[in-house]
Image (spheres, coloured by chain):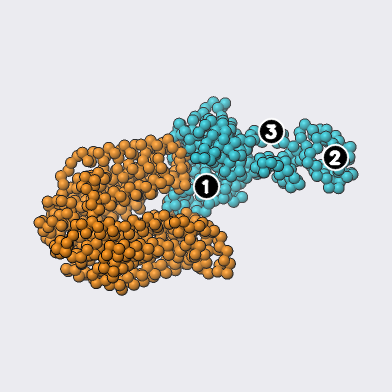
Chain colours: A cyan, B orange
């Protein structure tokens, strides 16, 4: 397939259930060979979008293409080339996990036995147990093994790590990196910011069935203000008059504020005059980007930029 | 009727340590989820009394007519199916012959389904865990479940008694009539309480309960056929349905078997609660064993998976068809020596056949057809269960066409029902000791396949257009079809009206000659409805619950 066809292209997607509007003009793009994060609060339409991409639901308007095909029309052909992992895995209670893996994998065209066994070992899953006795995490592992034991061009993962312990989350992260290394594409719907920041090239944030933010993660960071903490040789209130400084919180000689990319140079020059002893600059975390849209609609800045921001920024900086 | 939504957090802290804390709340919660179901069951069952009474009063208007009936009523066929006639000379006794067994067995079914629905099904779905996580005593919810299911029996019994009284039937007998039906219902509340503890799935619990009911029905059938005059054999006491019969309303009016039924219900419920104490939530008594780590290529195909999921259903219904076929054949043999072909009353019962034996065989074949229809619906409803359970989405996310997936479920239901008909019919013939040949009876039974297909067509149509209601509506259609085909004359329905229903339309061989048109019409309607349903399923959204 030609490399300029996106793995997923969704524009203006609309879907209603009775009187409820689930999607109201959603846009989403996944380029080939990239990992795309898909973020949004509960009920914002992530799973509905994914179900439309799988041809399980029919869109009311807008367009969606998957690997160049139409999901509803070409479902059977397209599904040979994709793998899907739901967030809430239902299995046949009286079949074993191993049987479920084989059934799901063979429905896609075949199972790579060596890969399957390797994944079973990595995820530490006993395939001879009846699905009835599996915990949520183990049911999730069944779907992950079935989905990953394939050479699918596109992986569609709907909160795939819900219920997994941190060690298994790490195994999952490694697996997705390998998938990406093989030039395959991934659409990853997730609530775990660290996971998305580690894995994703692009991010789409949706709310109430609309896309509110989309782009490369590093570009998105540029669009938003950097948080800066400084310690000066005098009362930090002197910074109040500096142009470009926002959300200033001064405490004695210390101050935390935010500054836009374009004003950073001028602000640093102004600070230099006050002999700063420490200076920590943190780019906005994904969590902040998300909370800006997720939080109360009326007060995005207050929710995302209050005094609590310092901790999240520090955590993000520490993680890097 | 409306009950306020109960709050699910239990505030009564002092009682929280008790195993019954939150009992009242649970009762209100179960009533709220089931009130419509309960009202319909109670109303439909109780209304049978005035309807059947009126029709029997018209059929036997004088004491002379009833006396004539009493002389011929005690045939093995009637004894086997509806119980030993012991007071056929009175209107009350005739009412018992015509409707008691239907009421008692139906209430047994209702009790089994209700207890499973609110018991094992909830536990399987994880809802019980959610409730038990709050300050709810270990036994509160189960006991509330048994109480609500038991109250259906009590209310239905009371309504039956009151409606019988309002028809001016003898008071003592009317109370015993209601009490005997209620007692059997209560006994099956106990039976299904136990089944819900032993099986680990709702389907397993329902199947086990229905199997126990079938065994008890057969035990009393054998006892009633073997009876001398109006005295039952001791075997009758090995079935709680027999206990209810032996209360003999409108004759001896015995109350003590009612106490035995109550004791059985109480003992079974107490045992069920004991088991509940000993086992883990979500598990049955039988320990889980490891299974194969790999799926065979056949299991991984849509047909193989559908067949595997229906395996237990298929085996148990085939077993049922075998037992029924053997039973029908052997009972038919018993009749050949007893029946008097000039008996006009028996003639009416058997649908106007000139040959009594063939009439009886025709009725048995109808029963086989109904069994196959019930299997087909239960099997096909597995398709909707896959969708509502969320497992269909994972399958369709693979390279699987919707029609192919649905086709596998249709194939299992259609082929399984055909096998049931052929096997059941053949065994009826083979075991009839020369009354009919195996091949003739297999063919007679197979003539009901189009009616079974029509049931499936209706379910497929509903599955396409009204997926959420499809299963219950399909069973409602089946229920009406069965009642009309079996009891149409009892409700004074005309023959042409009965012939316009699925099971009534099929030529009732060997009593009636085969004719092609009704079978073709049934098949055409079945295919039409099914095709519409499949078309709609291809174009609609997948709707999990």
Q: Nearer the viewer, residue A288 or B248?
A: B248
Q: Are marks 1 and 2 on the same chain?
A: yes
* Nearest the eye: A199 or A71: A71
Query: What is the spatial separation of the Cα atoms under label 1 and label 3, in whole angstroms?
Result: 32 Å
Which residue is labeled 3 in the image? A219
Chain label for disc 1: A
Residue bearing the label numbered 2? A239
Q: Residue A7's spot in the image, x, y percent?
A: 55, 31
Q: Earlier in the sequence, mark 1 or mark 2?
A: 1
Evaluate if marks 1 and 3 touch, with contact meaning CB atoms under 8 Å apart. Answer: no
Give the structural element (helix, strand or loop) at label 3.
helix
Q: Chain of mark 2?
A: A
Q: Which residue is rendered at x = 61% and y = 46% of the image?
A: A170
The numbered disc on residue A88 is: 1
Looking at the picture, how far across and down is residue A172, in whole percent? 58, 44
Measuring 85% from the left and 40% from the top, which residue is drawn there? A239
Residue B65 percent coordinates (x, y): 15, 61
């Amino acid at each position: 397939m030609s490399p300029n066809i996106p793995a997923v292209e969704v524009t203006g997607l609309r879907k209603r259930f009775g009187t409820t509007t689930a999607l109201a003009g959603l846009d989403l793009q996944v380029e080939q060979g990239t990992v795309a994060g898909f973020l949004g609060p509960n009920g914002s339409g992530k799973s509905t979008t994914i179900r439309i991409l799988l041809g399980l639901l029919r869109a009311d308007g807008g367009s969606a293409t998957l690997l160049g095909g139409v999901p509803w029309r070409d479902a059977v052909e397209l599904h040979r080339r994709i793998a899907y992992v739901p967030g809430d895995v239902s299995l046949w209670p009286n079949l074993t996990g191993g049987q479920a893996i084989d059934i799901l994998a063979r429905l896609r065209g075949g199972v790579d036995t060596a890969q399957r066994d390797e994944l079973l070992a990595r995820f530490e899953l006993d395939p001879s147990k009846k699905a009835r006795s599996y915990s949520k995490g183990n049911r999730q592992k069944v779907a992950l093994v079935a989905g990953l034991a394939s050479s699918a061009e596109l992986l569609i993962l709907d909160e795939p790590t819900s219920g997994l312990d941190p060690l298994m989350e790490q195994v999952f992260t490694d697996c997705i990196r390998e998938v990406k290394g093989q030039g395959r594409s991934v659409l990853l719907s997730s609530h775990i910011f660290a996971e998305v920041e580690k894995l994703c090239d692009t991010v789409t944030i949706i709310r109430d069935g609309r896309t509110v933010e989309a782009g490369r993660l590093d570009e998105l960071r540029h669009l938003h203000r950097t948080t800066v903490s400084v310690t000066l040789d005098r009362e930090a209130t002197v910074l109040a008059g500096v142009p470009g400084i926002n959300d200033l919180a001064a405490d004695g000689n210390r101050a935390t504020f935010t500054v836009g990319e374009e004003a950073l140079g001028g602000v640093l020059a102004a600070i230099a005059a006050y002999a700063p002893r420490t200076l920590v600059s943190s780019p906005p975390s994904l969590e902040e980007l998300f909370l800006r849209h997720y939080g109360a609609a009326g007060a995005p800045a207050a929710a995302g930029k209050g005094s609590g921001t310092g901790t999240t920024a520090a955590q993000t900086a520490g993680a890097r | 009727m409306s009950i306020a939504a109960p709050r699910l957090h239990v505030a009564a802290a002092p009682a929280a340590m008790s195993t019954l804390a939150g009992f009242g709340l649970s009762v209100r919660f179960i009533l709220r989820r089931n009130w419509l179901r309960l009202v319909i069951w109670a109303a439909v069952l109780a209304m049978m009394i005035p309807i059947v009474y009126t029709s029997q009063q018209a059929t036997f208007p004088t004491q002379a007519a009833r006396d004539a009936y009493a002389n011929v009523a005690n045939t093995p066929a009637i004894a086997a199916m509806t119980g030993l006639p012991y007071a056929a000379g009175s209107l009350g006794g005739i009412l018992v012959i015509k409707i008691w067994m239907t009421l008692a067995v139906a209430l047994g079914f209702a009790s089994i389904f209700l207890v499973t629905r609110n018991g094992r099904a909830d536990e399987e779905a994880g809802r019980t865990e959610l409730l038990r996580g709050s300050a709810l005593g270990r036994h509160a919810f189960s006991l509330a479940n048994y109480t609500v299911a038991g109250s259906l029996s009590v209310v239905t019994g009371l309504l039956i008694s009151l409606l019988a009284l309002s028809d001016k039937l003898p008071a003592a007998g009317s109370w015993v009539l209601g009490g005997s039906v209620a007692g059997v219902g209560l006994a099956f509340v106990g039976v299904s309480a136990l089944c819900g503890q032993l099986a680990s799935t709702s389907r397993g619990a329902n199947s086990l309960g229905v199997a126990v009911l079938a065994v008890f029905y057969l035990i009393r059938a054998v006892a009633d056929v073997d009876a001398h005059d109006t005295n039952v054999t001791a075997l009758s006491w090995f079935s709680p349905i027999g206990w209810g019969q032996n209360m003999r309303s409108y004759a001896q009016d015995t109350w003590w078997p009612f106490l035995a039924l109550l004791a059985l219900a109480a003992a079974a419920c107490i045992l069920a609660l004991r088991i509940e104490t000993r086992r883990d939530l979500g598990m049955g008594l039988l320990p889980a064993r490891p299974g194969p780590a790999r799926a065979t290529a056949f299991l991984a195909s849509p047909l193989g998976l559908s067949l595997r999921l229906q395996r237990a259903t298929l085996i148990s219904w085939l077993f049922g068809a075998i037992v029924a076929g053997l039973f029908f054949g052997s009972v038919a043999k018993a009749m050949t020596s007893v029946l008097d072909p000039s008996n006009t009353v028996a003639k009416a019962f058997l649908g106007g056949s000139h040959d009594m034996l063939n009439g009886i065989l025709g009725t048995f074949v109808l029963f086989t057809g109904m069994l196959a229809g019930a299997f087909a619906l239960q099997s096909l409803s597995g398709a909707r269960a896959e969708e509502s359970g969320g497992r269909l989405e994972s399958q369709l996310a693979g390279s699987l066409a919707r029609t192919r997936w649905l086709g596998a479920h249709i194939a299992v239901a259609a082929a399984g029902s055909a096998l049931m008909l052929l096997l059941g019919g053949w065994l009826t013939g083979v075991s009839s000791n020369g009354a009919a040949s195996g091949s003739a009876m297999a063919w007679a039974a197979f003539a009901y396949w189009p009616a079974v297909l029509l049931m499936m067509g209706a379910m497929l149509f509903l599955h396409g257009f009204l997926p959420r209601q499809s299963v219950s509506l399909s069973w409602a259609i089946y229920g009406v079809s069965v009642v009309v085909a079996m009891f149409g004359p009892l409700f004074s329905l005309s023959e042409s009206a009965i012939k316009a229903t699925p099971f009534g339309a099929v030529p009732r061989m060997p009593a009636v000659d085969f004719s092609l048109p009704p079978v073709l019409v049934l098949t055409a309607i079945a295919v039409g409805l099914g095709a519409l349903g499949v078309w709609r399923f291809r174009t609609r959204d997948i709707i999990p619950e």
